Image (cartoon, rainbow, N blue to C red):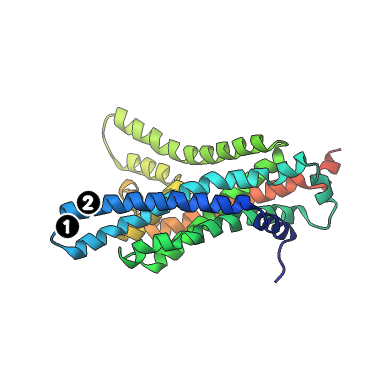
Amino acid sequence: MKINPITKKDLTITSRSMRFSWGLFAYESVLFGVFLIAMGAIGTFGNRYYANSNAESFSSFISMFPAVGVTEVVIVALIIPIMTASSIAGEKERQTFDIMLTTQISPMQIVVGKMLSAVVRVMIYVLASIPIMAVGFTIGGISWFSLLGYLLLTIVLALFEASIGVFCSSVCKKTISAIIMSYLIVFVICGLTVLPLIFVSLYQYMGPGVYGSSERVLFSAATLCLLPNPVMTFIEFFGVALTGEGILVSDILDFSNPVTDFIKQGSVWIGISVLLLLAITLCFMKLAAYIINPLHHNKNK
């Protein structure tokens, strides 16, 4: 199987460095700490409320899945921009970027290679945490299909943030600038998708208080803006995994028509959201490849 040369080089360098091993150790230590805290909380809750029912006491272990899963998602969201923002900007600082462009590797291959090297490293972290998460599956009753869905969603999140990081790395000349810009773009995307719902809610709260059909349409349209929000995607996923239906969308997307009735189903919402996130990922990849393409700079000159 042919492997992207950029990915192969980066992973080879990473595997020979103790920094990756210490990072994996720190990652597992944080998850183990969360695991112990969750176990203590579950044990206290179970002893207090489920003293006469072992079945219900064991079912409380289902909360282990979101506790560890949310911690992993937060860690992935924080480390991916750091890994990818230094991918091209670091080459520029080491003055090796121009040498890379003289090879037969295309700009898109460079972008894909830098993204995959970060995603593979992150997925090693995630896979190493499966034994800890397995408690929620073997005792709490979570299906293995939910574990597969969680891994796929984590990959989508990693690709999404990796594309933003590589894009910022291609724009900036300094690594620290690329990191700050990456976090800012992710924050803006998540924030802008929530703003319409906030504005509509404030309008409804400060308005006459009448909730007619036009207000429902406006409220539902603002809710649909949350589709490309990765935070909402994971909230809905954990809701489907734990209860079989979405946590928020089914409540706030309450305008009844065939379109909204179809979209507000948890699995449908997640599927559409994943497609939108992948589309945004592809856009950032193409922008990054366009920026680092030397032919583009020659045309401008």
Left or right, residue 277 beside residue 15? left
Q: Element under label 1?
A: loop
Q: Is residue 162 visible?
A: yes
- x and y percentages locating residue 59 in the rendered image: 25, 62
199 lies above or below 9:
above
* Residue for point 84% across, 48% down: 99
- x and y percentages locating residue 75 in the rendered image: 49, 47
Q: Is residue 236 visible?
A: no
Where does the N terminus fall, quadrant-wise? Answer: bottom right
- x and y percentages locating residue 125 in the rendered image: 53, 56
Left or right, residue 55 beside residue 3? left
Q: Element under label 2?
A: helix
The one nearer the camera, 70 or 167, is 70
* Residue for point 30% across, 31% down: 205
Report which residue position mark 1 lands on.
50
Amino acid beneath label 2: Phe
The one nearer the camera, 68 or 260, is 68
* Residue for point 15% across, 62% down: 53
Where does the C terminus fall, quadrant-wise? Answer: top right
- The answer to the question of whether label 1 and label 2 lie on touching residues, with beta carbons closer than 8 A, is yes
86 lies above or below 65:
above
* Residue for point 45% across, 59% down: 150
Report which residue position mark 2 lands on.
45
The one nearer the camera, 141 or 17, is 17
Amino acid beneath label 1: Tyr
Mark nearer the N terminus (1 vs 2): 2
| Circle 1 crowding by C-alpha within 10 Å: few under 14, some 14–19, many from 20 | some
